[in-house]
Image (cartoon, grey):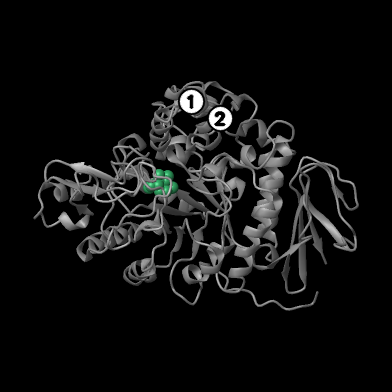
Amino acid sequence: MGETITPVRERWWKEAVAYQVYPRSFKDSNGDGIGDLNGVTEKLDYLKDLGIDLMWICPMYRSPNDDNGYDISDYHAIMEEFGTMADFDRLLEETHARGMRLILDLVVNHTSDEHPWFLESRASKDNPKRDWYIWRDGKNGAEPNNWESIFSGSAWEYDETTNQYFMHLFSRKQPDLNWENREMRTAVYEMMRWWLDKGIDGFRIDAISHLKKEPTLADVPNPENLPYAPSMVSHLNYDGLLDYVDDICGNVFNHYDIVTVGEMNGLDAVHAEEWVGENRGRLNMVFQFEHVRLWEPQAGLRPTPAVLKKIFTSWQEALEGKGWNALYVENHDVTRITSRWGDTEHHWRESATCIAAMYFLMQGTPFIYQGQEIGMTNTRFASLADFDDVSAKNKAKDLKRMGMSDAEIIAFLTRTGRDNSRTPMQWDSSPHAGFSTHQPWLKVNPNFEMINVENQLHDPQSVLNFYRQMIHLRKREKALVYGRYDLLLDDHEQIYAYSRLYGDERFVVLCNMSGKAAVWDEEALTLEGAQCVLANVAEWEEGYRLRAWEARVYKFS
Ligand code: NOJ
């Protein structure tokens, strides 16, 4: 100890605790079974009380809803089901009135096929907006290349008006914008400024890793001879992508005092600094995906503590003193973390809180996905008709074609599907979990009578109160914001342990990521002179032993 660490530059968004709202599932204020903006406003005091400073709201723009709002048909209007622009303005004002900030989802890899830009683009080959999207002739009576869409099937859709195909990396109702086109970029930048001038506090940038496509659009290797090649090498973090990012930052972001977080699938820690290095003037943070394996079937599998240590530590070390991490374990595209990494059957509360302490107290801005703070779990649907997600439905068709039974497909989607994290927020034990007075658009998780906010609000041992205590601890202790991360007990098979060092202050976070008691040697890590400042069990034994999924945080002074 006594070693002096140079703090990275202090910024409000580094000290903030962030919360992600999926508006369709958060709170329905008008009884139509669909969450809405007034529902979010209604719950601002709940978020404030939890200790939230920054809210990211998933797309609430006008949209035909093929991909629940990630297919935008009007960037300047609100989805009718969610309310009006006046409702949005009120949400922004009320958020600011509570000293909180609001960032929006910026979806500019693609629009909806119902966006007026695309309607013009598809109208004729010589339309001035033709080149705003990616159009190609077919090849030998088939698609222009063999790329697979991230949502299954070909990445191309035939359009008979002009006898050409357009590219869609996601659903066929989400045509990709052509970022090579300067006029398109100018229009997109104007839209960004329109929102920033309204007073929003920044953006989470959707699918930013896919903006750049390999210029010749050549076929990619398809060794297994599948109908389409699943490899993303030609459009995931492709060479030249950073030029687009520089253009966006130079033209728009750098002129505002905002926070930006890029959704950066495909990025590893080695290259992280290029994106968020503070001297680079690019993004403030990225959501990396190495620990959650977005779009991969392995996403449903539980990683060992060793794997988690390797991934998180590589990011912590790569950005120390250089840039800033976005910390998260859940979002609307991945399954619920307690179901995935924890043990919902035997140690639901302990594993939910242990995972929380493990990721939340590292260096970076922690994000909580709605419902994570009460330990919501994956759901169970009885029939294929219960699933809503466009990617799940496409996948189900593929699997059926391959000969899988409905039961097998349901089992696969239950393990991996995005609907798991999109079931309505569980507010209380009344019908529809207090989310709505009407049958919700997606079935409520049947466990809502046990897992809900109301049950947990006044229970000192609840997952919710653990989050609350942990958030307040982080707010009190600068070391937990800015302190350097060092992995401890590196080779321990059960315990994930690390320290945070800031000037003379030192914290140690200890998490037993397993269902069995775990011990360690005092010589490897002593707690002498330390005080336990947070634990996920009511009483703990002093000593070098943690029970199943036990987590403790120590302060050395
Ligand atoms: C990433 C978003 O988080 C996801 O929900 C969406 O389906 C795709 N991008 C396409 O916009």
Q: Is residue 313 left or right of residue 390?
A: right
* Residue that appears at 82% across and 64% down: 556
Asked if marks 2 and 1 touch (Cβ < 8 Å), the reply is: yes
**Residue type, mark 2 in image:** Thr
- How far from the left and from the top, in percent, is residue 73? 26, 44
Circle number at residue 443: 1
User: Is residue 69 visible in this depiction of the protein?
Assistant: yes
Q: CA distance from mark 2 to mark 1?
A: 9 Å
Residue 18: x and y, percent? 54, 53
**Direction from residue 205 to residue 526 in the image, left or right:** right
Q: Mark 2 falls on what kind of element?
A: loop
- Residue drawn at the location 35% of the way across and 60% of the way down: 196
Could you tell me residue 244's position as x and y percent?
34, 67
Between disc 2 and disc 1, whose residue precedes?
Answer: 2
Question: What residue lies at 30% left-to-right and 47% top-to-bottom?
Answer: 168
Q: Point out the image quarter for the N terminus.
A: bottom right
Disc 2 versus disc 1: nearer the observer: 2
Viewer-proximal residue, 398 or 432? 398
Q: Quadrant location of the C terminus?
A: bottom right
- Note whether residue 58 is visible: no
Amino acid at the residue labelled 1: Lys
Residue 350 placement (x, y as % from top left): 74, 40
